[in-house]
């Protein structure tokens, strides 16, 4: 304990903090030697890069800054007033790791991860008819993270896609690329292997080793897939994935050399940068069976899809572990060790190659346990730095560099997603507490689960806040967002019922100092600064009917830049 306190004091010093990370690399939470190793490796490797680049990292984050960040990163929502006040008042040296453990076990962790991966796998506007109705798929995603299922196992289940799109969920992933094996090849290799093959679709890649035949060799694994409609349930079409025993992808050479009516040659399936798939010969005289509409075709004589999934998810695959290690790192740290996260190519090397190797090895050794991996990253000193940058030497002094620091010398800034915003707005305004305090009709047993966007309009929120980034992680706010915040529906959240923040601040048994304190703790998860406290106390106490001013103050904090971002 004495050593830890010495480290804590040393780390506040802008020069000695690098040495503290490099030499001591300690953490107040050590669940096992193996668990502790990864966070120590993270801090040592990052610290060594700071030293090499002449960078002075930011100071450790304040408790309020860390609290808001970790809640949003792990649970996708800000903490309540009571949770904020309790954490800030807690003087235990292990309160941060205890909070990390608690959030990883919270049901909202699974929901948040499902939100993130739904966007990775589908985006806001996925291609393909019916893919916007994917409640079954989203439920399946939540189940994977709630059970802490290993990443390689659920990716295997996703790509095997057994069952139907409503009850099991996973076949819907393929519905986006129905009859388009080339498009499917691009997204699978980019998402799960971090390899961008799209250039090799039309010609040999000019800057990477990938040839056209590499692309079509991978596409051949998907050439026999087809989507079958096998019924309906709850007004949803049941889609299922089928695989034929015959069918090839045809290669016609570079696009610039193709001619009308040109016949292509079949391409054998070939693993990326690997061997050609050896397939057994079909029985003599084999013909594809006739399938009645609405029924699922029989299993193929030989499944190319199964062989691809086996190869893709095996631990020794040179791309699979590195791709997910880099993607999850970016989820917490703001940018990948390879940036962008889905371009792990020779021409785009990692900023910290040894660290990426260590992260990938940890995941393999720990059977791709995502929760344990995130726990280690969140407990690192690197993650817990302040977002306020210091003046640095050797680093680009630009807004982009400050928002996404290449050397991770301070924490990232990021805008909240549409889902994070609405649920955090409800916490900040006390809307859910006010609704929960109201009498309900106990005899109604047919009430549907509440809409997570309530009481606001889902389509508006997704329109204005659904894509806050440009695809590279950089914020792109606009006039529409500004207009919604100033003229939209947020007043619906500031209710005058018991449990709501406005109602609680109007209680006369509280001093104005305490009311202003609660206003800030509940909205931006920090105490008010002295100037803020002084001005607001004077503003409210000078008005014999302060309700209007209180409502405006709540709205101002909920629409502020501070609330819009994770810091």
Image (cartoon, helix red, strand yellow):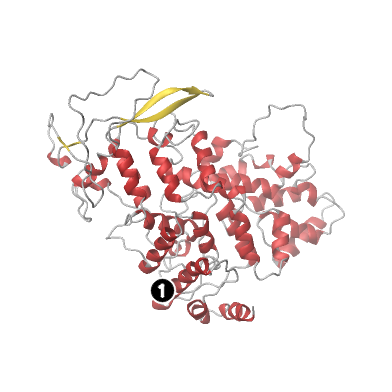
Q: Taking 543 as reference, is 122 above or below it?
A: above
Q: Is residue 356 visible?
A: yes
Residue under label 1: 49
Query: In the displayed image of the protein, which residue is found farthest to the right?
Result: 509
Q: Is residue 565 visible?
A: no
In the image, 277: left or right of 468?
Answer: left
Pick the residue in front: 445 or 519: 445
Q: Quadrant of residue 180?
A: top left
In the image, 246: left or right of 534?
Answer: left
Pick the residue in front: 534 or 195: 195
Residue 411, x across and y down, in percent: 51, 64
Residue 51, x across and y down, in percent: 42, 78
Quadrant containing the N terminus in the rendered view: bottom right
Q: Quadrant of residue 296?
A: top left
Q: Taking 9 as reference, is 226 above or below it?
A: above
Residue 229, x across and y down, in percent: 40, 24
Q: Quadrant of residue 516?
A: bottom right
Q: Taking 410 as reference, is 186 above or below it?
A: above
């Amino acid at each position: 304990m004495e050593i830890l306190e010495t480290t804590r004091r040393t780390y506040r010093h802008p020069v000695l903090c690098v040495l503290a990370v490099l030499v001591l690399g300690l953490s107040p939470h050590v669940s096992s030697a193996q668990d502790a190793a990864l966070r120590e490796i993270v801090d040592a490797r990052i610290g060594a890069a700071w030293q090499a680049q002449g960078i002075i990292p930011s100071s450790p984050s304040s408790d309020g800054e860390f609290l808001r960040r970790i809640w949003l990163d792990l649970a996708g929502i800000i903490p309540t007033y009571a949770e904020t006040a309790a954490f800030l008042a807690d003087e235990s040296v292990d309160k941060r790791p205890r909070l990390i453990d608690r959030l990883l076990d919270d049901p909202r962790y699974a929901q948040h991860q499902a939100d993130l991966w739904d966007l990775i796998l589908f985006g806001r506007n996925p291609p393909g008819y019916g893919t916007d109705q994917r409640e079954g798929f989203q439920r399946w995603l939540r189940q994977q993270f709630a059970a802490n299922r290993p990443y390689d196992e659920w990716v295997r289940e996703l790509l095997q896609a057994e069952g139907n799109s409503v009850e099991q969920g996973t076949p819907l992933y393929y519905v986006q690329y129905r009859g388009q094996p080339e498009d499917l090849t691009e997204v699978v290799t980019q998402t799960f292997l971090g390899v961008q093959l799209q250039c090799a679709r039309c010609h040999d890649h000019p800057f990477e080793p990938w040839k056209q035949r590499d692309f079509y060799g991978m596409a051949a694994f998907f050439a026999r897939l087809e989507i079958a409609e096998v019924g309906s349930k709850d007004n949803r079409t049941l889609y299922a994935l089928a695989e034929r025993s015959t069918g090839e992808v045809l290669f016609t050479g570079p696009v610039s050399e193709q001619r009308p009516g040109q016949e292509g040659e079949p391409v054998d399936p070939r693993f990326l940068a690997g061997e050609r798939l050896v397939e057994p010969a079909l029985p003599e005289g084999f013909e594809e069976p006739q399938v009645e509409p609405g029924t699922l075709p029989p299993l193929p004589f030989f499944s190319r899809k199964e062989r691809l999934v086996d190869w893709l998810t095996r631990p020794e695959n040179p791309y699979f572990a590195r791709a997910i290690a880099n993607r999850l790192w970016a989820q917490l740290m703001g940018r990948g060790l390879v940036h962008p996260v889905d371009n792990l190519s020779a021409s785009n090397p990692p900023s910290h190659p040894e660290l990426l190797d260590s992260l990938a090895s940890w995941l393999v050794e720990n059977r791709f346990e995502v929760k344990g991996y995130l726990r280690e990253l969140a407990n690192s000193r690197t993650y817990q730095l302040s977002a306020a940058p210091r003046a640095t030497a050797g680093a680009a002094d630009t807004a982009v560099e400050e928002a996404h620091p290449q050397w991770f010398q301070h924490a990232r800034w990021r805008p909240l997603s549409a889902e994070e915003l609405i649920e955090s707005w409800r916490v900040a305004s006390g809307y859910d507490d006010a609704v929960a305090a109201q009498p309900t009709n106990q005899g109604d047993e047919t009430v549907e689960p509440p809409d997570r966007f309530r009481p606001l309009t889902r389509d508006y929120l997704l329109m204005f806040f659904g894509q806050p980034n440009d695809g590279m992680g950089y914020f792109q706010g606009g006039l529409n967002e500004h207009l919604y915040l100033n003229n939209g529906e947020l007043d619906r959240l500031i209710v005058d019922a018991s449990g709501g923040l406005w109602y609680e601040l109007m209680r006369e048994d509280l001093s104005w100092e305490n009311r202003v304190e609660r206003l800030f703790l509940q909205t931006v998860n920090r105490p008010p600064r002295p100037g803020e406290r002084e001005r607001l106390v004077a503003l409210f106490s000078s008005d014999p009917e302060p309700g209007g001013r209180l409502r405006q103050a709540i709205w101002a904090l909920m629409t502020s830049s501070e609330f819009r971002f994770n810091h």
